[in-house]
Structures are given as C-alpha cells and as structure tokens.
Image (cartoon, helix red, strand yellow):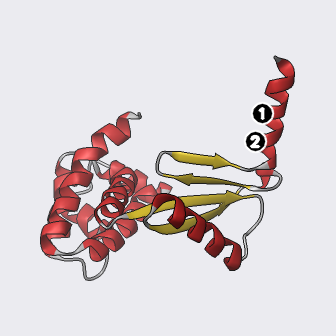
C-alpha cells in the first residue's frame, strides 16, 4: 500500500462521514472529483505546493462553484495539514466508501478497443448476478491488451485479455 493512500484514508473517511451525516453523497462525490482533477493537474500541483499560496487561495482554486461551506472547511483542513496533493487518492477512497454504503460494486472494464454500450451492459448484468449488487461500470482502453478485456471489481480481477492469455501460456511453457 502506498504512503499516499495511507495518508489519504482518514481524510476520505472524514469526508464520507460529513457527506453521510448531511445526506450529501452525490454533491461531495462531484466536489471531490472536481478538486481531485484540479489538484492532479501539473500546473495546479506546482501552484498548490508554492509556499506563498495562502490556504484561502488554495481553497478558492480547488472548491467547485456552489460547493457548500463544509466542503470548503474540509479543503481548508487539507491545506492546513499540507495534504492537498492527496486529493486524487482521497476522492478515490471516498468513492469506495460511498459504493460500499450504497451497496454498489465499482467495476473497471479495460479493453483493447472501445466497447459498444450493449457489451458494457452485458458485462454489468453478469457482474450484478455474480456479486448480487448493483454494479457501476467504468470503461478504459489499453491497446496493449491486443484483444479481450480485463475486468476489475473490488478484490476480483478477471483477465480475459489476449495479452494475459499469452503471458500465462508463456509461463506454462517456461516451466
């Protein structure tokens, strides 16, 4: 486990608790996603690390338009503790906590080419049957897979890619 994830975990839990108590899961998801995108931008990251940037200016840069005061306070806490760079990890961990609370499985389907929506729906339905929960599917493209797909859902990884099959075949032949 990376140090960034270890540092981010208590902040993600705090954000989740605030959102849960206020019934604000979706607005906090949106706000954290926005702030994480800004913090991950190389130009913004350099600016956020600059000692002359005040905490108020950092919050103004990272808070989306219309974010509630509690979110701004959360960003101010991150700024005070020098943790703004962990916003991408905090946002990811928050989404995991939210998915668990809402009984949703987050799945990523990485394929060699863009999948048609009908195939994504078939994968979603199969995963829903397997996990017995609603499934939120995110897609990604990785041409190095050659063909097929890799499905990652929680602790489960299903590698049906041609690249994975070739690697397993090569390993079997080497032994």
Q: Quadrant of residue 76?
A: bottom left
Q: CA distance from mark 1 to mark 2?
A: 6 Å
Q: Quadrant of residue 101?
A: bottom left
- Residue 168, label in figure: 1
Query: Can residue 144 be seen?
Result: no
Asked if residue 111 is positioned above or below residue 69 in the image, the reply reads above
Q: State the residue lying farthest toward the top.
A: 175
* Residue 88 placement, left or right of 26: right
Q: Whole-percent x and y of residue 7?
A: 28, 40
Query: Can residue 172 be seen?
Result: yes
Image quadrant occupied by the C terminus: top right
Query: Tag 1, which secondary structure?
Result: helix
Residue that appears at 42% across and 51% down: 46
* Residue 124 placement, left or right of 61: right
Residue nearest the observer in this picture, 93 or 61: 93
Q: Quadrant of residue 125?
A: bottom right
| Residue at image mark 2 | 164
């Amino acid at each position: 486990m990376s140090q960034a994830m270890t540092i981010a975990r208590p902040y993600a839990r705090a954000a989740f608790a605030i959102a849960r108590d206020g019934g604000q899961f979706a607005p906090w998801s949106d706000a954290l996603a926005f702030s994480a995108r800004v913090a991950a931008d190389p130009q913004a990251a350099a600016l956020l690390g600059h000692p002359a940037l005040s905490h108020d200016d950092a919050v103004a840069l990272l808070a989306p338009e219309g974010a509630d005061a509690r979110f701004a306070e959360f960003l101010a806490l991150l700024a005070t503790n020098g943790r703004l760079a962990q916003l991408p990890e905090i946002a990811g961990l928050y989404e995991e906590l939210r998915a668990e609370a809402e009984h949703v499985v987050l799945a990523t389907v990485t394929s060699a080419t863009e999948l048609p929506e009908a195939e994504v729906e078939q994968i979603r339905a199969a995963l829903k049957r397997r996990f017995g929960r609603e499934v939120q599917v995110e897609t990604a493209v990785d041409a190095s897979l050659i063909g097929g797909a890799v499905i990652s859902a929680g602790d489960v990884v299903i590698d049906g890619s041609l690249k994975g099959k070739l690697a397993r075949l090569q390993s079997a032949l080497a032994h």
